[in-house]
Image: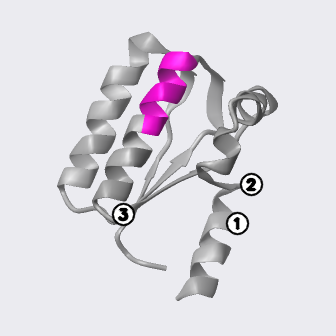
Amino acid sequence: MSSNVQVIEPAGILDSTKAEEFRASVEALLDEGVEAILVDLKDITFIDSSGLGTLVVLLKKARSLNHSFCICSMNDQVRMLFELTSMDRVFEIYENRQAFEDAKLKVS
């Protein structure tokens, strides 16, 4: 696995009040040259449309830089939101951090 992977662990609710701060922190990592970002959602209890939109914006920015932006450890509510919006087909999603690490080891 690349040593240039940054794990981000947001907590609570990812909504319009927290989305901008989250976006800015991830964009700063991308601007610093982090090649892969794993967003671990284990401590997120709810995501609204603003939070989901922010994740999409960040995915697009990462892809434009040829970097990866992955998600892991979704709860049932978040997984349902991703499935209803078909975002589960857009994002690279892992069951947990170990599954991400295992997948990345297979690639290297």
Q: Which residue is mark 2?
A: 95
Apparent side of residue 81 relative to residue 55 in the rendered image (left or right):
right
Apparent side of residue 73 relative to residue 7 in the rendered image (left or right):
right
Q: Amino acid at mark 3?
A: His
Magenta stretch, main secondary structure class: helix
Instruction: Point out the stretch of residues depicted in magenta.
Output: 49-56
Q: Residues within 10 Å of mark 2 (few under 14, many from 20)?
A: few
Q: Are marks 3 and 2 in contact (CB under 8 Å)?
A: no
**Horizontal and vertical percent position of residue 89:** 68, 49
Q: Amino acid at mark 2?
A: Glu
Residue 79 located within the stretch drawn in magenta: no
User: For the view shown, which residue lies furthest in the left direction?
Assistant: 32
Q: Which residue is mark 1?
A: 99
Q: Which residue is mark 3?
A: 67
Secondary element type, mark 3: loop
Q: Amino acid at mark 1?
A: Ala
Q: Are marks 2 and 1 in contact (CB under 8 Å)?
A: yes
Of the pair 26 and 98, the residue shown nearer to us: 26
